[in-house]
Each structure stands twice: as structure tokens, then as C-alpha cells.
Image (spheres, grey):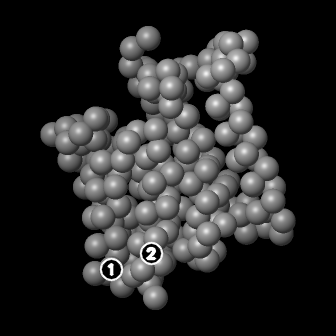
Amino acid sequence: MGKAPDLYFYLRKSVHIISGILFLCLANQEGSVYFLGIFVLLVIILDLSRHYIKPWKNFFHKIFRNYLKDAEVKASPAGATTLWTGLYATLVIFPFSTFVAAGSVAVFADPLAAISGRLAGFVELRRGKTTAGSVIFIFISILLLRWYWNIPLIHSIFISILLSVVEIFSPPAVENFLLCMAGATLVELFTV
């Protein structure tokens, strides 16, 4: 099966943003670390098992095939799985404010960059990553880090550029996870 129609691309990015917002909102609730941990573990098990249990694979693909990238169908975990895993790992490892700042970038900048890259195009940098998408990613990251999280402007610019590089060069199978972890690490390093 070839490239998913634009409708599914936009639905996929909408699910990325909406599920990310829900994750960020739920993370501040009492007992959420346990609940979200069980949820992420269940998602990982269900995602991995589709590669080994044929009836589950058929059922999974019947429901989600149009939302998956070709690589996710064949071998890689679904993008939602790596996003939620990355968000959970940052929630558990880093201070809450760092988790929310880094999670906000992963939840908003990444999908909005993909959408703008698809709409504007420009020069493709690597595996579907475009200059337009990268510029939008950096711009949204700076807005989130500087004007919402009040991280100094020069630090926000530097973090945003480094995260854009991570986003461009990360293996697609773990891009969302690495974006969360790199974002949290950089926010911690530059806000001490």
C-alpha cells in the first residue's frame, strides 16, 4: 500500500496533538504515574504483539492501517506508541515542569511542522523532512519555550535548533521518543 491519503495524514497529526494534550493534562493528576505507566505498557504490548500474533495483526491493521506509515506496518512501533512512551519516560525521569515543557514541544511543534512541511514543501532535507517544516518546528518550539515556559530567548533558540536537528536525523521508529527525551535533557541543561 502506498502513501496514505492526505485525510489520514491530517487525522494522524490530529490524533498526535489531541492524545498528547490529554497525556499532558492527565500527568498532573493524583496517581497518574501509575495509570499512565499501565496505559503505556499496555500500548507497547499491543503494538509489539501485532508483529507476532497474526489474528491480532489483522485486527490491528483493519482498524489502524490507514493511520500508519508504511514502516510502521512492516516493523516499527506506531508513532503514537513512541510518543506516549517518550512522554511517560520524561514524566518519570525529569521534574514535572521539564516534562511539560519538553512534552509541549513534542506534542505541538512536531505535528505542526509536518503539516506545514506537507503544505509548503520547499526543499526536502531528509526522509520527508522539509525546510519549511524545520523552520516551523523551530519557530513553534521557541514560542513554547520562551513565551510560555519563560526560558531565556537565547536558550530557547539553541534548544529549538538542536531539537530540530534531532527531529530531522532521528530514526523514524524512535523519533517521537528521542524528541521527548532530548527536549527534556536540553531544557534541564539550559534552565539550571
Q: Nearer the viewer, residue 113 or 175?
A: 175
Q: Residue at x 71, y 63 (%)?
A: 27
Q: Residue furthest right?
A: 31
**Residue 34 x %, y %:** 81, 59
**Which dot marks residue 155?**
1
Q: Residue at x 64, y 58 (%)?
A: 88
User: Which residue position holds label 2?
Assistant: 187
Residue 139 seen in render: no
Q: Residue at x 58, y 69 (%)?
A: 99
Q: Residue furthest bottom?
A: 192
Q: From the viewer's perspective, is residue 20 above or below residue 99?
A: above
Q: Secondary structure at mark 2?
A: helix
Q: Residue furthest front?
A: 52
Q: Residue at x 27, y 52 (%)?
A: 134
* Amino acid type at mark 2: Val
User: In the image, is 183 to the left or to the right of 40?
Assistant: left
**Residue 64 x %, y %:** 61, 23
